[in-house]
Amino acid sequence: PVPMDSPLPTAALEALRAALEPGGWLDRPEDLEAYLVDFRHLYRGRTPLVARPDTVERVAAVLRTCHEHRVPVVPHGGNTSYCGGATPREDGREVVLSLARLNRIRAVDPQGYSITADAGCTLQAVQEAALAANRLFPLSLGAEGTAQIGGNLSTNAGGTAVLRYGMMRDLVLGLEVVLPDGRVLDQLRVLRKDNTGYDVKQLFVGSEGTLGVITGASLKLFPLPADYATALVALGGIGDAVALLGRVRDAFGDAVVAFEFLPRIAHELAVRHVPGTVQPFDHPHPAFALVELAVPARIPEFAERFQEFLGEELESRRVRDVVLANSGAQRDALWHWREHVPEAQKKEGASIKHDVSLPVARLPDFVARAERRLAELAPGARLVAYGHVGDGNLHFNLSPAEGDLDASAFLAQAPRVNRAVHDLVAEFGGSFSAEHGIGRLKVGELARYEDPVALELMRAVKRTVDPLGLMNPGKVLADGEAAGATPDPAAASGAPE
Ligand code: MLT
Ligand code: ZN
């Protein structure tokens, strides 16, 4: 039955059901619920229907039908966006398009080092398919068991292996995309070299479903490391971390696959909220770096050299302490802690988040300046700044003062805090969104901080590819912005970061 309060024309919904066939959609309120709220619970939207096509042809039929009936579409993957990118708006006029049933690994080519998969495969399923062929698919992030490849692509996901392997954009060989009118862009190539004009597929990477729906991808694979050498290094602070990063890369080059920074509070919160968190040192240190080297198959002495390197660091007192993982289980335990820091902070209460990147060398100055500014703006708030220092990327988050349970008063400071942090990031030549994208949350920030010529080009692309403005409206660019309306940064955001 058509939901009684659906603001969408019955004819449009009937046509969608016909395009999908039974089992291909959800429309009972209890089934829709999971699609209405984003991962961080910043937004609650409405929709009369979630389309769940199981073939590319059906995705195309859904978009063609929506185009015909002028129905906006919100593509939906694993729903792990930090910016509300996959949540429909409140007016109930948008259809949600889930890619979950499009979840086959199409091909693995170990010799050509590529894998081709449906967009609805989880990141973990792609990693496992690569591993089964003795290859590595390197993208790695906390949500990998849930996040889908299509979402990883459309948000240009980052994670903990960017230092060595790059972001999702760097890992794409080819894409298959359904355009807003139902045409299919078929560029599922596995070529390493292909200089044939504009790189059209890259438009869809990082555009967050605002230009089309990715249905399949060919991705790069890498040689599987024979082993990993993983160490947790205790440090005085971010300055020590940046210096250590320089030395470890000088010594080990591309073998350094991860370099994550964790302040003491990231450990305290994890111990409090995440069962099984490691206690690697017998007394607390101000900060830590989780450093990982991939050991190439034929050079096992790599791990020994790493041990020597760390010994020298310790002897010369450049670092305060070191633990080297002696087994896969110890390595897993260190990563378990790192990957659960966001969850630990969430369980501690409200948080004000930032996902910033800067030139690596400027991180220590930035942190010092930002700390001083935050002491004035949000006195007592606790800074939980952790993340991918190897990429110059910090999750520069705040938690309320210990025992402060007034979440709404704390969150009321978010707009001022966000403004101060992002202004400072801009002053340092950084980005206000390193890896989490724009979604709905940061539309105003993009309008404020992005180069005006870049914004003009983005709007021109949006107008050209999606002239009716049906694809994920109000994400990345404000609704109507591409058509010439003036963006209203204040109206665009509407939720604390
Ligand atoms: C991470 O690095 O843990 C994620 O990007 C999530 C976060 O912002 O905390
Ligand atoms: Zn991150």
Image (cartoon, rainbow, N blue to C red):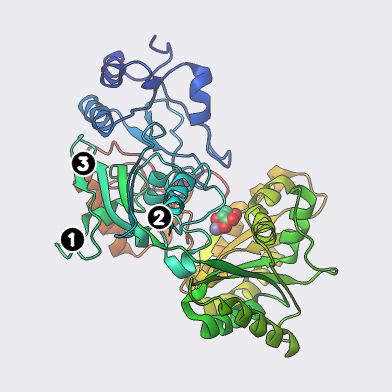
Left or right position of 313 against 445: right
Asked if 390 appears above or below 115 in the picture, the reply is below
Q: Position of residue 183 (x, y in %)?
A: 18, 37
Which residue is located at x 51 percent, y 41 percent? 146
Which residue is located at x 29 percent, y 31 percent? 55
Closest to the observer, 399 or 185: 185
Residue under label 3: 467
Q: Can residue 259 be seen in this view?
A: no
User: Mark 3: which amino acid?
Assistant: Pro
The residue tagged with tag 2: helix, strand or loop?
A: loop
Mark 1 against mark 3, which lies toward the viewer?
A: 1
Asked if 86 appears above or below 414 in the picture, the reply is above
Residue under label 2: 156
User: Mark 2: which amino acid?
Assistant: Asn
Circle 3 Cα neighbour tier, 10 Å, few/some/many (<14 / 14–19 / ≥20)? some
- Disc 2 under 8 Å from ligand 2? The reply is no
Per the model, the C-alpha gap separating discs 1 and 3 is 20 Å
